[in-house]
Amino acid sequence: MVRSGSFDVVILGAGAAGLFCGITAAKRGLRVLVLEKSNKVGKKILMSGGGRCNFTNLHISSDNFVSSNPHFCKSALARYTQWDFIEMVERYKVEYEERKHGQLFCVKSAKDILGMLLSECAAYSVQIETHIEVDLLEKIKSSTCNSFKLSVSQSNQGVNNCELLGKSVVVATGALSVPTLGGSGKGYDIANQFGLNVLPRNAGLVPLMFEGVMKELCEALSGVSLEVEVSCNGKLFLEKMLFTHRGISGPAILQISNYWKPGCSVEINLLPLQDATQMLQLLKKDQPSSMLRTVLKPYLPKALISKLQQLWWSDLENCSLAGFTNNRLDSIGKRLNRWVLKPSASEGYRTAEVTLGGVDTNELSSQTMESKRQSSLFFIGEVVDVAGHLGGFNFQWAWSSGYAAGLAV
């Protein structure tokens, strides 16, 4: 049960960034209190990577992050690297494995990563309290006190209101994505309270949806997946795409969703390793009596071929390749390499893995995460306008930004 008292550091949020900041600060001998509004800590850690936690990536660079200032994350990422976190994981003998694109996952369970963090918290006397609502946060300046005052209530203890003092406050409240795991806009409210600019927010790493004919097609293909090259607004990813009953998902779509804007189209190359136009012309020459749907079977899922036939060559579905003009085959080939689709919307924060936008990086020190407007107030993790690609990058930002603030509080 939380009681009134004073601390060197009060951290709001017991997710990846908040816990790591608390550990870093406590190692410096500071009295650290971490406050979490939900019933347990590290919920996003536990659910990530299908319960295996993709805790970092071997190939970290600023190019893997989306921000209004792409240079902002460089300092923190350089100060605490993926290799530093890997060393900690190995020291705790957490078994991990490398998957494609340098992604590192726990072999057994995400509980191993959370357990490691909580062991560090215990070793350095980090106090953690759950079910906490921060009702009021204000800065007190007087001849005898230069601290933040927090009025908090603990929901699992009846109405247990108390006041806390913290020399520094770190906002690690997460963002709007997956509200069932504790996501909220609390951090933005605090930023606004202290005069910091907050950039518009959008759901990121999120499936895309369609209406009308395309939605019906996706519903019919729900569960079908294939490797594609998807591009939008100058960005391109080669990954798997999955059809869902609402639209399209899978790693390729989650990645490109960070760059998609409402009203924009996405371009999908269904045959990223082939020049489809050239391939179809050669197949017509070599197999003139074969059906188009037959010659495409080695390259695309059967159900998808059937739906594309309805869309693109339904008038010729019973013709052999010899019955297709070269111009018609060229047209179909171009669409196979560049299928232009216009999503109606994303699935939103309910299923988004990250929130794009947030506390403006121009308001923060890139070396310490401290507010330039309010001394001793820090913002770390997802609440900041830094969002990583899929593949462990958002966890690395949590570790790195938490570490930077933990050294400065």
Image: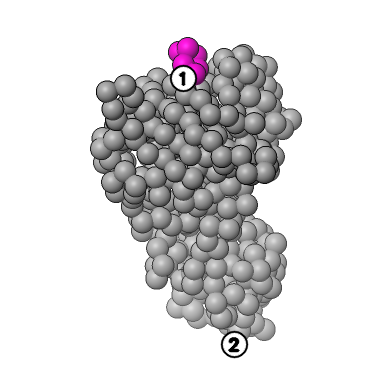
The color scheme shown is: one colour
Q: Residue at x 34, y 47 (%)?
A: 193
- Per the rendering, the mark at residue 248 is none
- Which amino acid is tagged 1? Ala
Please rate how many residues cluster around mark 1, counting C-alpha atoms within 10 Å: few if below 14, some from 14 to 19, many from 20: many
Q: Which residues are magenta?
A: 24-31
Question: Could you say which is closer to the camera, residue 136 or residue 228?
Answer: 136
Q: Position of residue 359 (x, y in %)?
A: 36, 45
Query: Which quarter shows the N terminus?
Result: top right
Q: Quadrant of residue 47?
A: top right
Task: From the image, tell me which residue sits under label 1.
Answer: 25
Q: Nearer the viewer, mark 1 or mark 2?
A: 1
The answer to whether any part of residue 218 appears in the image is yes
Q: Mark yes or no: residue 369 visible.
A: no
Quadrant of the snapshot with the C terminus = top left
Farthest-out residue, right: 108
Q: Secondary structure at mark 1?
A: helix
| Whether residue 406 is situated above or below residue 235 in the rendered picture | above
Picture coordinates of residue 348, whole percent (x, y) = 52, 61
Badge 2 local density, few (<14 within 10 Å), some, or many (20+)?
few
Magenta stretch secondary structure, dominant? loop
Residue 248 locus on image (x, y percent):
58, 63
Image-based side of 217 in relation to 33, left or right: right
Residue 376 appears left or right of 228: left
**In front: 204, or 223?**
204
Taking depth in this image into account, of 272 and 124 the one nearest to the observer is 124
Residues under labels 1 and 2: Cα distance? Answer: 69 Å
The mark found on residue 315 in the picture is: 2
25 in the magenta segment: yes
**Residue sitting at x 67%, y 17%:** 93
Q: Amino acid at mark 2?
A: Asp
